[in-house]
Every structure is written in structure tokens, then in C-alpha cells.
């Protein structure tokens, strides 16, 4: 018989998530916590979710705490998600930045298993095929996530057929991937070399990351409350030069950070720049 998650333990864990990750669960999400923690509980041979949560919050076993937090982050993604951000990148932003006399820096700020930064890299390489002299000073794509385990998988760059099928065009498969075994494809070495993976928490001080010409911060702000979301946007705005661009998810806005960011319209959609 499954052990029920006590209301008091759920409330404690919800506060813990809000403090450590900025994730706001709200009421009546016990089912979500039980579902997300189930695999990690098996990993630590725990059958009592209440005791497991108490241990995670206590920090007495740092690895258990880290794995519990990782279990609660959402890492569902696919290639060229929503399409329009990559169209904005290739038709508006890359042409605007191509001749600058410094390295192009792009940040995928919640990269999950790597589909977003590798999709960005593919768009840049496709652009360079048509514009060989573009970005003569180099290209750096920084991809970050809060989960080290997810980052390890992303850095490996190997995907099963189900993951590959989630939005990756066949032409891109042939050009930028090779088969590493019967059921998996791996990103090519030129693609892999363009992306640097590092662990980062959007709640932390971001100044050490340096400036970025383009920041992808997509489908992650929806998990934060209004005040935390505004704070993150303010910090990202500080990383943008005057020509820099921020691309958000389709359901996200700059509410609370209008003093730092302003909307820009282009034929393919919307992006944001630092308000000067």
C-alpha cells in the first residue's frame, strides 16, 4: 500500500522548492510531487515519501537533496521548439550581428537535454554556409541548466530515436548527426565544439557569465512567481549589450521588468532588447 504524502510535509517541500529553485507549486499538487520523486526514491531505496522529503530538506545527504531538486525541474523539450525563435535568429539577429568585430556569444539559459543549444548551433552553421565570412571572431554558445545530471546527458549529445523524432528535420539529421549505435544518433563534432555546458541557477547572481548577444530564456519563467520572474529578467537585461536580444517562450512576457527591457517586432515574431 502506497504511503500518502502528508499535507504538512507537502507544505514544507513546497516552501523548500520556492527557496532553492524559485518554483511555486501552489495548492493540491501532491500528485505531481509524488510522481516526480518516485524514481529518485527508488534510487535511494526509500518507500516513505514523507521521510524522504524530510531527509531532502535537512540536507544531511547532499546527493539525495540534489537529486530530489533535480527531479522537480521540468526537462521536457524538443528540437527547434516553436520554430519562430530560430527564424528570428536566422533572419533578423544573425544578419544584424554577423559583421561585428568580436565573438558572438549566445546563452541557452535552461538548456535541458541540449536540444535548444544544438538547434541554435545548427541555425548558425546553416547561416554560415550562405555567409562564409560571418562571425570571423568566433562563436560561443553557453548552455546552462540547474541539473548536473541533465547537463551530463546534454554534453554527451547522444539521443534515442524517440528524442530525435521530436522536431529534428531529416536533412539536419543527415548533416549534423551520426549513428553511434543501432538506436541512437550523436551530434557531430563541429556541432559539439560550439556548445559549452555549465551548471547555473537563474536565482543566483548572473554577472559572472559576462555579456551575451542573444539570450534564449524560454519556457522556464512560467515556473516562477511574479517577483522572482521580474528579478531574473532584470538580471538578464544587465547581460545584454545595446544590440543584444532576449527571446522568451510564447506564453511569457517581460511583466515587472518593463523598465529594463523593451519589445522589438520583426517579421517572424517578437524579441526584447535592453532599454537604454
Image (cartoon, helix red, strand yellow):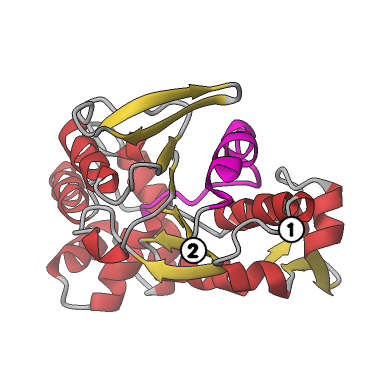
Q: Position of residue 106 (x, y in %)?
A: 47, 55
Which disc is residue 103 wearing? 2
Residue 122, by quadrant, is bottom right
Q: Secondary structure at mark 1?
A: loop
Q: Position of residue 98 (x, y in %)?
A: 58, 50
Determine the residue positioned at 78% across, 57% down.
161
Q: Position of residue 243 (x, y in %)?
A: 40, 42
Residue 41 in sight in this render: yes
Going from N to C along the chain, the mark reached first, 1 or 2, is 2
- The verdict on residue 9 being magenta is no
Determine the residue positioned at 67% across, 66% down.
191
Determine the residue positioned at 24% across, 76% down.
62
- The verdict on residue 82 being magenta is yes
Residue extent of the magenta highlight:
72-99
Left or right of 15? Residue 72 is right
Mark 1 lies on residue: 132
Amino acid at each position: 500500500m502506497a504511503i500518502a504524502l502528508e499535507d504538512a510535509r507537502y507544505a514544507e517541500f513546497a516552501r523548500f522548492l520556492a527557496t532553492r529553485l524559485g518554483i511555486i507549486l501552489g495548492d493540491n499538487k501532491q500528485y505531481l510531487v509524488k510522481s516526480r520523486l518516485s524514481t529518485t526514491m527508488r534510487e535511494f531505496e526509500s518507500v516513505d515519501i514523507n521521510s524522504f522529503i524530510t531527509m531532502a530538506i535537512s540536507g544531511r545527504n547532499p546527493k539525495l537533496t540534489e537529486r530530489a531538486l533535480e527531479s522537480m525541474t521540468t526537462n521536457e523539450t524538443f528540437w527547434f521548439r516553436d520554430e519562430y525563435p530560430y527564424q528570428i535568429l536566422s533572419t533578423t539577429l544573425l544578419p544584424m550581428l554577423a559583421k561585428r568585430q568580436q565573438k558572438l556569444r549566445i546563452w541557452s539559459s535552461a538548456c535541458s537535454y541540449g536540444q535548444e543549444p544544438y538547434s541554435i548551433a545548427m541555425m548558425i552553421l546553416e547561416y554560415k554556409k550562405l555567409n562564409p565570412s560571418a562571425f570571423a571572431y568566433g562563436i560561443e554558445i553557453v548552455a546552462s541548466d540547474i541539473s548536473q545530471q541533465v547537463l551530463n546527458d546534454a554534453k554527451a549529445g547522444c539521443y534515442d530515436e524517440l528524442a530525435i523524432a521530436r522536431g529534428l528535420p531529416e536533412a539536419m539529421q543527415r548533416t549534423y548527426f551520426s549513428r553511434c549505435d543501432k538506436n541512437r544518433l550523436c551530434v557531430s563534432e563541429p556541432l559539439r565544439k560550439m556548445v559549452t555546458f555549465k551548471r547555473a541557477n537563474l536565482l543566483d547572481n548572473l554577472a559572472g557569465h559576462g555579456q551575451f548577444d542573444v539570450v534564449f530564456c524560454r519556457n522556464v519563467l512560467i515556473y516562477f512567481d511574479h517577483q522572482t520572474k521580474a528579478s531574473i529578467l532584470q538580471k538578464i537585461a544587465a547581460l545584454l549589450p545595446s544590440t543584444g536580444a532576449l527571446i522568451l517562450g510564447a506564453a511569457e512576457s517581460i511583466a515587472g521588468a518593463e523598465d529594463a527591457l523593451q519589445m522589438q517586432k520583426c517579421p517572424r515574431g517578437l524579441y526584447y532588447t535592453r532599454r537604454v
